[in-house]
Amino acid sequence: MTTLINTDLVVLDANLGDDTSSVIRHLATVIAATGRATSVDALFADALARENKTATGVPGGIAIPHCRSQSVVEPTLAMARLNPAVDFGAKDGPADIIFFIAAPDGADNEHLKLLSTLARSLIKKDFTAALRTASTPAQIVALVEGALADKPAPAADRSAADAPTAVNTPSTMKHLVAVTACPTGIAHTYMAADSLMEAARAAGVDLQVETQGSGAVTPLDPAVIAAADAVIFAVDVDVRGKERFASKPVINSPVKRGIDEPAAMIAEALAAATDPHAARVPHLGSNGSAAQSGVNSSDASTEHLGIKVKKVLLTGVSYMIPFVAGGGLLIALGFLFGGYKITDIASDVVLHNSLWNLPDGGLAIYLGAVAFTIGSLSMGFLVPALAGYIAFGIADRPGIAPGFTAGAIAVFMGAGFLGGLVGGILAGLAAYWIGTWRVPRVLRGLMPVVIIPLLGSIIASGAMLLILGSPIAALSNALNHWLTGMSGASAIVLGIILGLMMCFDLGGPVNKVAYAFAVAGLSAGTALNQAPWEIMATVMAAGMVPPFAMALATALDKKRFSLAERENGKAAWFLGASFITEGAIPFAAADPLRVIPASMLGGAVTGALTMAFHVTSQAPHGGFFVFFAIGNLAMFTLAIIVGTVVAALAVIALKRWALRKPVATLAAQQLVSQNS
C-alpha cells in the first residue's frame, strides 16, 4: 500500500491566503507537484465543489477539505498549519490545522479505512495538540502515521464495546442507535459517529452507530435496532435500509451537526424517546411503500401539499428523461443516415433485410432504419414511464405497474402527455389507498406483487378508458394543434415564454415543465410539420444560455465574482455546450435577484430568435454535441450567442449598479434543493 503522506505534502506555519479557496488551491498545487494528481484545476474544482455543499470546518480549529476526483492518482493527505487561521465554517472560529484528503474515484476499501481513521483522530485533543507543537514536517508525518496505524473497530462494534456492560447498566438506561453518512463518505461520516458516541458516553447513554461511508458498511444488529428508544440520522444523503428503523422516534440533522453539536442531538433523541408526538421514521405498509405510522412521519409530515405534488411530478419527469434522451438521439441518427423517408420505410427495412441482405440504398439506409426503429420504440415509453414513475413517487414500488398500465392506456386513447400525468396520479393514489387496507396475514405477501397491481390497474386504467381518456385526448389534441399551428408573431411569443420558463429556476419544476412539453411532442415532428422540432430547438437553446452567460460574465468582469464563481465559470462553458442549465445554479444560489432575471432576459431573447429563424432539433438533449440533429445550425448558434451576451451584460450591469439587498439563506438553499 502506498504512503498517504510524506514531508513534501506538509506545509507549516504558512500564510496561504484569507479564504478557503486560496488554501484549497494551494494544497491542490502541493499534491499535484508530488505527482499524486494530474491537474491542479480539476482537483481544486472538485474539492471546492464539495466544500460548497457543506463547510468542512469542525470544532477545535480543524478543517478537513476532501473530495474524490478523477485527477487523483493515489489516495493522498496534504497537511497545512496556517498562520493566520482561515474560516472554514466551524462555529467556534477559524481553523489553523488543515488536512486535505484527496481520494481517487476508485479508491480501495483499505485506503478509505485509513482515511476515516485519520478523520476520527482529529477529534482527539491530544492528537491535535501534538500537531500544533510539532516543529518539522517529519514530526507531522510521524504523528499522522501513528494515528493511521491505530485501526479502530467499526463504529457499530466499538460503540457496543465501549458501552457499559449489562451487569453495570441500570434498567432505566436509554438505548439509542444512529446512522451517519456524508456525500463523499470519507471524513464527516466517521467523525460524526465518534463525536456522537463520545457525547452519549458522557451522558450515560448506550449508543450504537452505523457508518454508511465509502467503505464496506457493517449494518446494525436488528435486535439492537428493535431495543432502541430512538434513532439519530446525522446524514446528508438518503439512509440505506431506512425501513429497518420504522416507527422509531427520530432526530434528523445534517452530518456536520453530529460533529458540531453531538450533545444536543443526544439530548434531543432522549427527549423524543419519551414524546408521543415526536417525529418518527415512516414504516412500510403492506404494500411495500412508505406509509404513515399513525404519528408524525419524519419525512412527510412537515411538507406542504404543493411540495409533495412537485416532488411526485418531478420524479416522473426525471425517470422519463433517460427513456427519451437516447431514443431521441437515435431517431435523429435515423434521419441523418436515411433521410426523412425513413419514417415510412423503417419497419419494412428492419424486418425484411439484414447486414447480409441490404436494402436498396445500401448500408446507410439500413443503419438509419435500425437507429430509427430503436429510437421510436424507446420514445414509445415516454408516457408510460412518466405515468409509472409518478405513481412510484406516490405509492413506491407497488405503484409502478398500475402507473405504466395507465400510461399505456393514455397512449392508446391519444391522451398523450396530459393523459400520462392524470393516469400516473390516479394509479399512484389507487395503489397507495389499496396498500392501507387491513388484510388477513395470509394475503399480505400477495399485496405488493398481485393484489395492488391488479386492482390499481383496474381502477386507474378503467377510469382512463371509461371516463377521462377521451376528454383529455380532445384537450391534448386541441392544445397541440394550437401550439404547432403558431407562426409569425405568435410563434415568437411562444419562444419568449419557453425561454423565460427554461431560465426561471435553472432546472427546477418550471424548467422541467417546458422541457417535458417539448420532449412530449418531439416524436410528432415530420418533414411537413416541423413545429414540434422548432419547439425542441427553442427549449434547448434557451436552456444553454444561463451557464454560457455566467461563464462569459466571469471572464469579462472578474472582480464582480468570487474566486469560487470564477472557477465555476470555467466549467460552465462545457455545461452550457452540453445543455446542462444547472451549471448556473452556483451563481443563482449566491445572488438570485440578479442572476435569475438576467438569465431570463437572455433566455427570452434566444427563444424568440430560435422560433423566428425556424431552427429545429430532432434530438431532446445534448446541446452542440448533437449538431447533426439541428436544422439551421448557424442560426441556432447565433441565437444562443445573442442571448448569452444579453444575459452576461445584464448580470454585470446589475452587479455594478443595482443595490444589493440581503437575501435569506433559505431562499438560496431552496433553489439548490429543488434542482438536486
Image (cartoon, rainbow, N blue to C red):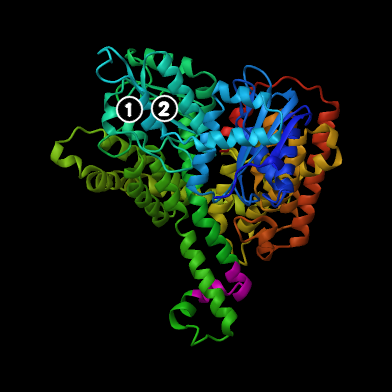
The one nearer the camera, 47 or 37, is: 37
**Picture layout, residue 539 above or below residue 367:** above
Image location of residue 99, percent across then percent down: 64, 33
What is the C-alpha distance between the residues marked 2 and 1? 9 Å
CB atoms at circles 2 and 1 under 8 Å apart? yes
**Is 72 situated left or right of 613 in this image?**
left
Q: Residue at x 46, y 44 (%)?
A: 316
Residue 666, visible in the rendered structure: no
Q: Left of 341 or right of it: where is 35?
A: right
Image height of 374 relative to 297, above or below = below
**To which quarter of the image does residue 289 belong?**
top left
Which residue is under mark 2? 300
Residue at (36%, 49%) from the top-left corner? 406
Amino acid found under the numbered disc labelled 2? Ala
- Along the viewing direction, whichever of 538 and 452 lies nearer the viewer: 452
- First reached walking from the N terminus: tag 2 or tag 1: 1
Residue in the picture at 67% in, 40% down: 503
Query: Is disc 2 surrounded by few (<14), some (14 to 19) or many (20+) residues within 10 Å?
Result: some
Amino acid residing under circle 1:
Gln
Percent coordinates x, y for residue 583 in the rendering: 67, 43
Of residues 489 and 20, the one nearer the viewer is 20
Residue 521 image position (x, y, % from top left): 55, 55
Range of the magenta residues? 333-346
Q: Position of residue 82 (x, y in %)?
A: 73, 27
Residue 564 vertical position relative to residue 365 in the rendered view, above or below? above
Viewer-proximal residue among 620 and 214: 214
Query: What residue is disc 1 on?
Result: 292
| Residue located at (47% from left, 52% from top) | 416
